[in-house]
Amino acid sequence: MSAEHPTLPPVRLPADAELARDALAAPLLAHAVRLARWAGPDTRVDAGGELVDEQLPQAVEVLGLTDDEDGEMWAGDAWRLAVDTGLVSVEDGEDGGTGEDGATGDLPGRAAPGENLAVVTGGSPQDVLALWLDGFDTVFADAVAPVLDDLDAILGEDGEIDIEALDWDPEVEAEFLEGVLGNLYLLTVSEGGPGEGPVPLPALAASMVVPDDMGEPTDDVLEQVSEAMMRLDEQFRLLEPIGLVEYQPVDEALMAEEGEEPAPPVDDEDVTRYGMVRLTPLGLYGVRARMLEAGVDAPAVGDLAEKGADALLDGIAGYPQAAAREETTAWLAGRDALGAARELLHAARGADAGSPLRRLHCQQTLSLVGAEAEPAVREVLDDAELGGLARVWLAERGATDVPAPPESMVFWLAVDTIAAQLDADGDLEELQELIEGLTGRHSGFFEAAWRVEHPATAEVLEAMGRLHRDKTVAKEARKAAFKARSKRGA
């Protein structure tokens, strides 16, 4: 009976213009833009497009980082990003010739502002975000690159890095970080999650390492969590400057105290010392973009505003209540109220598995339309699927001339309503109260209910048998479900 719901809850994102401002303010991209504007005929690069050593102090000065002991590292990272994103174009030097030191060999290349630099000042917000996404891809690749702590151990006889000696699988590393960012995204957008608050690094690492069905983690699993934390600590330090996350690193003093890699904290007082991370709004945008590219269903509030009523009612099927209301409000904005009501009612029809929830959301959306929807609602009073919904809507608005529904419509609406609530995965206690209220108000409820021509009748009666707290009534529901299944199979 359950309809297909989106894989992930919908995310609320700021407008593209606001996200684009955040992108340009990200320290690494801002530095890259500044170096792109500085690049010119005298800017020399090596064969790999990196600034030659003699140029680094100038780049550091351009960035205002002369007092930062890591200034050259920041300048190098920003330059690489500028080259990779097309903010800077690099022209290779000519073979042969004589260098400035009198030695023969390859001349250094030259650099100049690239075509994408114009995007920064003249591009649309979407253009700026596309540029930032390219930068995110570059930093992501850096984050999953191997850590070269001991070069001597991995250099081959020819002086080249021996890839096999690295014990590094790029696909596995990328999949792990993608999974971590996916879990962080899910925690952020889920109701009951931390929302905009930070997530402890141990919890994030454990979400990737500890099996779901494991009780108390073994020492081996805890060691894997600690190793994952240390790797994530390095990766989040790289991802923060591009604006993806806000990150409080693992406390170095803590590691010194323990003498080894930290183990997961055992109490809330320690948790912040083991690292805290949150996705920024720009980070949510970036992770979602990668998910969509990978084919993941990752909706955002506002996606359905320009689509038809059928897409709206199907799309919000798995949304939390607040997000569904926000989406429907955006959909109604700017639409003719009467026309929107007719479109919603038309889209609510059907006997497929998702139709009860569509009708529930249709009724809730019509409540936002107001009195202007009344002519459209009255047009469906005699409709077998919508007549009950129409009467409820009119009664809630105080209408006194609503015709009494036939008994068949009353029971059909009862089955349809419970089917929708079951599919919505709402509050269990509220659903029990609904079920017990219906059976209490209608004597002989099950004798009439099993005969209802609704595709979900048997499933609804079975659910009533599970959920009703009166054992005698629950037994009646199960008997009625059996009759409904027998009738359907006849």
Image (cartoon, rainbow, N blue to C red):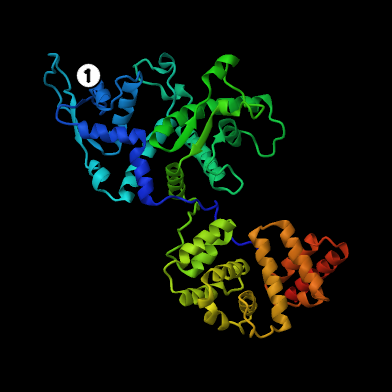
| Left or right of residue 281, residue 78 in this image | left
Name the image quarter holding the C terminus. Answer: bottom right
Residue 331 rendering spot, x and y as whole percentages:
46, 65
Residue 23: quarter of image:
top left
Residue 44 rendering spot, x and y as whole percentages:
19, 25
253 relative to 485, above or below: above
Q: Is residue 450 visible?
A: no
Residue 38: quarter of image:
top left
In the image, 233 versus 389, the foreground residue is 389
In the image, 477 versus 406, the foreground residue is 406
Residue drawn at x 69%, y 84% as measured from the top left: 404
Name the image quarter holding the N terminus. Answer: bottom right
333 relative to 225, above or below: below
101 relative to 468, above or below: above
Total number of numbered labels?
1
Residue drawn at x 15%, y 25% as measured from the top left: 95
Residue 313 rendering spot, x and y as whole percentages:
54, 66
Residue 178 rendering spot, x and y as whole percentages:
49, 39
Residue drawn at x 34%, y 16% as measured from the top left: 159
Pointer 1: what residue? 54
405 relative to 81, above or below: below
| Left or right of residue 70, residue 231 in this image | right
For label 1, count other residues whose C-alpha is less than 10 Å away and answer few (under 14), some (14-19) or many (20+).
few
Q: Is residue 344 visible?
A: yes
Residue drawn at x 56%, y 25% as measured from the top left: 273
Say what amino acid the circle numbered 1 marks.
Answer: Glu
Q: Secondary structure at mark 1?
A: helix
